[in-house]
């Protein structure tokens, strides 16, 4: 194990808490200050896009007409809105399963040291970084800027290079994984969750889609607790949803190791 702990890359959540008690984001400071100029570009492009007709806004933001005004108002007030730590702002199933509030103090510290959240608006944030409510997907094409994933790729690659972690647990969906160059990692580990099902009288392993985020939350807790930098540390991992590490399904290509956790039947 190196002195630099492994990084854990996570997506944000679509669902977010509203409100906050912190000062606006630009006065609070974040963990990757070198990204601030790029953040300014994305914010300006997003604010400009909020002046588009509602049909264009609903398509860009990925929301129905009923929520378009709410999302638009949040985006227009990004620079003045109160903030809260990202770990409190993101409230989707992955973060519910991670349940950061129940972690003991030493694991909360590891959480902030090791977890990096890829965001369409912010690029990358640590769990304690103060952010306001907002709405922007990593794959949403912003007029004048393009898809955030493509825009952020050189910036996030540089930021993670400076982080200098030898091992990176890449738990990003494809949309977010496109926002960095994984060849900079000494060892990149990707994780699949598979269900062992019966189809036409035969057993088959099928990728979990609907519950994928929930399953990742418990895995992150285990990675933090044991500060794992090698998949072999998952051999005795008892996932609360009944998934077990299958070393026989591990494949390696270049610097990337793909592993699988399979439902126990």
Image: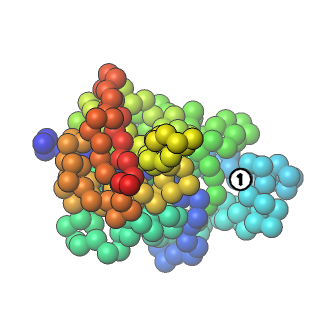
Secondary structure category for the residue under label 1: helix
Q: Residue reaching furthest front?
A: 201
Q: How many marks?
A: 1
* Residue 35 seen: no
Q: Nearer the viewer, residue 197 or 20?
A: 197
Residue pictured at 63% horizontal, 52% vertical: 136
Q: Nearer the viewer, residue 25 or 205?
A: 205
Placement of the N terminus among the 4 image quadrants: top left
Residue pictured at 55% horizontal, 71% vertical: 17
- Label 1 environment density (alpha carbons within 10 Å; few <14, some 14–19, many ≥20): many
Residue pictured at 29% horizontal, 47% vertical: 245
Q: Give residue 251's quadrant in the image.
A: top left
Q: Position of residue 187 (x, y in %)?
A: 27, 32
- Is residue 174 found left or right of 139 in the rendered image? left
Q: Position of residue 64 (x, y in %)?
A: 78, 60
- Is residue 18 found left or right of 231 in the rendered image? right
Q: Which residue is mark 1?
A: 61
Q: Nearer the viewer, residue 70 or 231?
A: 231
- Is residue 39 found left or right of 135 in the rendered image? left
In the image, is residue 67 above or below residue 116? below
Q: Position of residue 233 (x, y in %)?
A: 19, 47
Residue pictured at 57% horizontal, 33% vertical: 150
In the image, is residue 263 above or below residue 19? above
Rendering colour mode? rainbow
* Residue 178 seen: yes
Q: Position of residue 88 (x, y in %)?
A: 45, 70
């Amino acid at each position: 194990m190196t002195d630099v702990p492994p990084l854990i890359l996570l997506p944000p959540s679509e669902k977010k808490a509203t409100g906050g008690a912190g000062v606006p984001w630009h006065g609070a400071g974040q963990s990757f200050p070198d990204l601030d100029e790029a953040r300014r570009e994305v914010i300006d492009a997003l604010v400009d896009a909020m002046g588009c007709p509602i049909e264009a806004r609903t398509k860009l933001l990925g929301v129905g007409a009923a929520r378009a005004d709410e999302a638009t108002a949040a985006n227009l007030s990004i620079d003045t809105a109160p903030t809260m730590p990202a770990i409190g702002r993101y409230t989707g199933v992955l973060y519910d399963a991670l349940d950061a509030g129940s972690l003991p103090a030493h694991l909360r510290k590891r959480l902030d040291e090791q977890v990096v959240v890829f965001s369409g608006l912010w690029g990358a944030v640590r769990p304690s970084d103060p952010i306001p409510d907002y709405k922007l997907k990593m794959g949403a094409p912003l007029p004048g800027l393009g898809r955030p994933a493509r825009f952020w790729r050189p910036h996030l690659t540089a930021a993670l290079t400076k982080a200098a972690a030898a091992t990176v647990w890449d738990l990003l969906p494809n949309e977010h994984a496109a926002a960095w160059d994984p060849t900079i990692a000494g060892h990149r580990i990707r994780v699949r969750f598979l269900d062992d099902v019966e189809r036409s009288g035969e057993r088959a392993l099928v990728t979990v889609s609907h519950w994928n985020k929930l399953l990742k939350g418990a895995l992150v807790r285990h990675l933090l607790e044991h500060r794992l930098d090698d998949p072999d540390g998952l051999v005795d991992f008892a996932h609360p949803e009944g998934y077990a590490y299958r070393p026989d399904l591990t494949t390696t290509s270049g610097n990337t190791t793909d592993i699988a956790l399979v439902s126990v039947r």
